Amino acid sequence: MSRGQYQKENQQNNDLFEEYLNDLPDDEMKVSSRVEQDVQQIVSEKKQKKQHRAVYISGTVIAVCLALGLNLYLGSIARQEPAEPDPVPVFTPDYKNPTLTPTSDYNRMVIDAHSNQNSEGVLGTDLRVPEMMVKDDYYRLPVPLSRFLLNGWRIGQQVIESQTEDGFYRIHYTLTYLDNSTTLEVTAVKPVSNDVPSFVIVTGIKDTGGLVELPQSIRGGMSEDDLLNLLNDSGIISTTVEGGNAEKTATVNNAVDMFYFQSYHIDFDLNEGTISTITLTVE
């Protein structure tokens, strides 16, 4: 039976019931009225039960949907793996002696720079020797750039300064340590047509972070008085230049006979009575 037919028959039954009540005597009318009230009460209670049931079903459906949605969300979070950090680009060339013949000054400089490194890594006591320790690694100027790269440094920036008459570039590099916590500035020479780090020769180092340790335990942060006393005790004549704002520069010059290089310089920038910058250069 359709909903329309049901409503129509229901209305007809109600009309017949109304006619029946109207034809009853008064004493029977009272009984019929009570019957009608009882019927209406029963109908009302059935409607309330249907409404409560509908609310209960709706609440149950909503709760199930929320639970499913929460499970799906938690499952998606559990499946997501943490993103791995991008690897730091590191160049690690094979450190080996170059197979060059001494047919030019530059080739001789490359060969001698490689053979000049102290394999034992022991720092001496003579400040007039161009050697140092950087982060517990031994270096002696001039030094191949590949030596720094093998010890955990990477090239952060390079700026070409000029091209020499001998056919190679003078260039500035900024070296950054792998943990990105420290940097060094170096000056180097390199072939015009060859970028292989094994053939790039570092001739100067500038340290502003106290990374370089020289003989006699000289490094950034040392007091000016301690530095000058050490230089004097070592028999080294230094020149001290007065500057503004309590800044001074102490310079050590020493003649050396190292194949391509004839002189070694150490410049100490003194700020408020302590070493702030150390610059080492062979020329």
Image: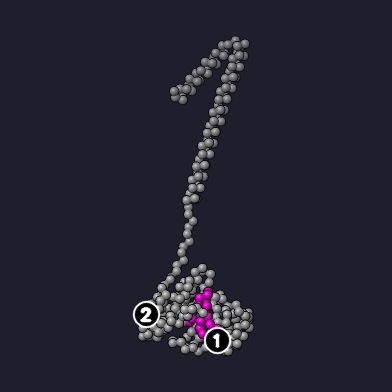
* Residue at x-position 53% and y-position 87%: 253
Q: Which mark is residue 252?
A: 1
Question: 105 or 97: nearer the eye?
Answer: 97
The mark closer to the camera, 2 or 1, is: 2
Name the N-terminal-most of marks 2 and 1.
2
Local packing at callout 1 (Cα closer than 10 Å; few below 14, some 14-19, many 20+) is some
Residue 98 is situated, as x and y percent measured from the top left of the image, at 39, 79
Let me know if residue 134 is in the magenta part. yes
Span highlighted in magenta in the image: 123-141
Residue 255 is situated, as x and y percent measured from the top left of the image, at 50, 89
Question: 84 or 191: nearer the eye?
Answer: 84
Residue flagged by tag 1: what amino acid is it? Val
Q: Quadrant of residue 161?
A: bottom left
SS class, disc 2: loop
User: Is 193 placed above or below 35 here?
Assistant: below
* Residue at x-position 57% and y-position 82%: 216
Residue flagged by tag 2: what amino acid is it? Thr
Mark 2 highlights which residue? 99
Question: 245 or 131: nearer the eye?
Answer: 131
